[in-house]
Amino acid sequence: MYNLFCKIKMAFVYLWGMLFKKGKFKPELFQIGSSDVQALFQLALPGIPVSLADKEYNFTTLESWQKIISDCCADNSPYQKEFHDCDDMADYLKGHVSNDYGINSCLRASGKNDSGYAHAFNVIIYQGDKFPEYTIVEPQSGELGKNYIIGNLRG
């Protein structure tokens, strides 16, 4: 019954966002090609598999990311082991950022968290001082800058 309630709540939140929230905040967008995204991660994380589905990636500033992630995480259902856990929340954040803000540079990652346990999370690309950079996002709390071990990335 709880699982049904969570699904109904998520459907309502999604519809509410589609009707009332989408487009209220317009972040400044930058663009990077998939080959440059590959190069960014090959330099920073040699040997990590990176699977990209798009030819171009939209991204924004870290300040805008903080607003976007805070907004998306506010609508997240509570953690429920095996039903709505880290992988579901990482997928949820990736999908909502793409749908609501037109930003496809919130990548889904898996690896290990601070405690060394298997974990799913997100990696975002943002505009640094001169070049695009990346940081890790904890999708359950929206916290940026986590120091997780990335095992693979897909976006």
Image (cartoon, rainbow, N blue to C red):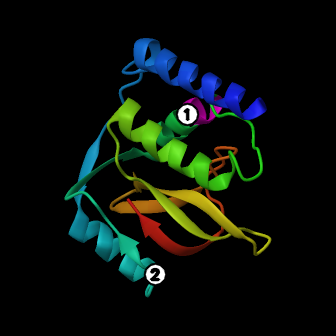
- Look at the image and say whether residue 96 sits in the magenta stretch: no
Q: Which picture quadrant has residue 72?
A: top right
> Is residue 8 shown above or below 112?
above
Task: Determine whether the residue tagged by mark 1 lies in a helix, strand or loop.
Answer: helix
Furthest residue toward front: 1
The total number of labels drawn is 2
Quickly name the residue at label 2: 48
Residues 58 and 55: in front is 55
Specify the amino acid type for callout 1: Cys
Q: Position of residue 118 (x, y in %)?
A: 69, 71
Decide which of tag 2 and tag 1 comes sooner along the chain. Answer: 2
Q: Position of residue 144 (x, y in %)?
A: 61, 52
Quickly name the residue at label 1: 72
Task: Determine whether the residue tagged by mark 2 lies in a helix, strand or loop.
Answer: loop
Residues 141 and 89: in front is 89
Question: Which image quarter is the N terminus in?
Answer: top right
Q: What separation in Å lies between label 2 and label 1 (alpha carbons)?
A: 27 Å
Furthest residue toward bottom: 47
- Residue 112 numbered mark, or none: none
Q: Position of residue 69 (x, y in %)?
A: 55, 39
Residue drawn 37% across the image and 52% down it: 105
Which stretch appears magenta? 70-74
Q: Which picture quadrant has residue 8?
A: top right
Specify the amino acid type for callout 2: Ile
Residue drawn 66% across the image and 48% down it: 143
Residue drawn 66% across the image and 54% down it: 86
Q: Position of residue 77 (x, y in %)?
A: 68, 33
> Is residue 85 shown above or below 33?
above
Circle 2: is it few (<14), some (14-19), or many (20+) Cα within 10 Å? few
Circle 1: is it few (<14), some (14-19), or many (20+) Cα within 10 Å? many
Residue drawn 56% across the image and 18% down it: 12
